[in-house]
Image (spheres, helix red, strand yellow):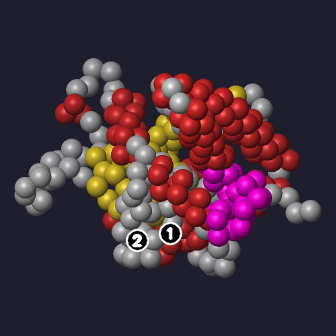
Amino acid sequence: MAQEYFDFTNDLIFRWVMEREENCLAILRAILPELKITAVKRRENEHPVNYLAFDDERGVRFDAIIEDDQERFYDVEMQVVNQPGLGNRVRYYQAQIDQETLKKGEDYDDLRESYVIFFCAFDPCGQDRRLYQFHYYEDDDRQLRLPTNSHVILINALGTKGQITPALAAVLDVMNRRRDNQNPLAVSLVKEIDGYNRDKKRRRALMNLKMRLKDEWRLGLSEGLDQGREEGKAEGLSQGRVEGRAEGRAEGRAEGRDETMLSLIHTLQVQGQTQKQIVETLALMQKSSLAAAQRYYDQLTEAASGGEH
């Protein structure tokens, strides 16, 4: 049986790739060729953002900010699941950059130019564009831009519209597991990721992360079912009718099941599974057809994203 392959969208794989400054430089130059970046260095955060990623088996690694040769700062993230609150998350990371890069005794006039960049395995804005860039504009006069020296870039791995560099297109091919792109950056990234999948120590860390995610999913399943039963019972009793109790329990169980299945979908996406693989898993669990499982998948993910596409 073939070993599971962990790709560029896997949290640990992405972190390992971005730990190498030559990769940071190549990827930033692919996204922002107009900046003509010639060198970068990583700055470890003093107030790190905790996230689920293992360094060996001893604990979490902390995020880092990238600084270029002109004292501009970058935070580059991988976002696999289209969940509500992406804008708030971007805002949080922007504040993180400002906090970490403003030196003691400096004030807001000394804030450096910064970029928050998200690689998204989905279309974050629903316009099929491969790259979205955001700034502060006046509501009535869209030509009037507030000079905050901050930039937000969302990169859509599924997009087909808009011009991007061949190197960035190569990175998106790596995200989508296309191995036929002969761009030097794509070839280099695929070789490195393949090496991480073969390395015994790295693979152990990857499997540990997978098992922890699975344990958290199981805990979520138990808690979701318990919550569903309790909510169903409470709703039914408040109605004071046998029909109400039955309906309340059913709705509670359904709600708990939906939350649990959404958590499962999130876990499988983090593990690098494709939508097709996830739908097949749902079909097996629910003993339903692939078409029914696909409809259920679409219903859950659409509800989680607030109905946006």
Crowding around mark 1 (Cα neighbors within 10 Å: few <14, some 14 to 19, many 20+) is some
Determine which quarter of the picture holds residue 260: top right
Residue in the image at 73% along x and 55% along y? 286
- The residue to which callout 2 is attached is 128
Q: Would you call the spot at circle 2 few (<14 residues within 10 Å), some (14-19), or many (20 or more)?
A: some
Closer to us: 306 or 10: 306
What residue span does the magenta drawing correspond to? 265-293
Does label 1 or label 2 sit earlier along the sequence?
2
Q: Is residue 218 left or right of residue 117?
A: right
Inspect this view and state whether residue 146 appears: yes
Query: Which residue carries the number 1 mark?
Result: 158
Residue 181 placement (x, y as % from top left): 62, 78
Q: Is 110 in front, or is 14?
A: 14
Q: Residue furthest left?
A: 141
User: At 12% across and 52% down in the image, what residue appears?
Assistant: 139
Quadrant occupied by the C terminus? bottom left
Q: How many marks?
A: 2
| 274 in the magenta segment | yes
Q: Is residue 77 toward the left or the right of residue 90 in the image?
A: right
- Which secondary structure, mark 1? loop
C-alpha span from label 1 to label 2? 7 Å
Residue positioned most to the top: 105
The answer to the question of whether label 1 and label 2 lie on touching residues, with beta carbons closer than 8 A, is yes
Q: Nearer the viewer, residue 21 or 291?
A: 291
Give the quarter of the image for residue 170: bottom right
Our reading of the magenta stretch's main secondary structure is helix
- Specify whether residue 165 is painted magenta: no
Residue 214's spot in the image, x, y percent? 74, 40
Q: Is residue 274 visible?
A: no
Q: Amino acid at mark 1?
A: Leu
Residue at 36%, 40% in the rendered image? 88
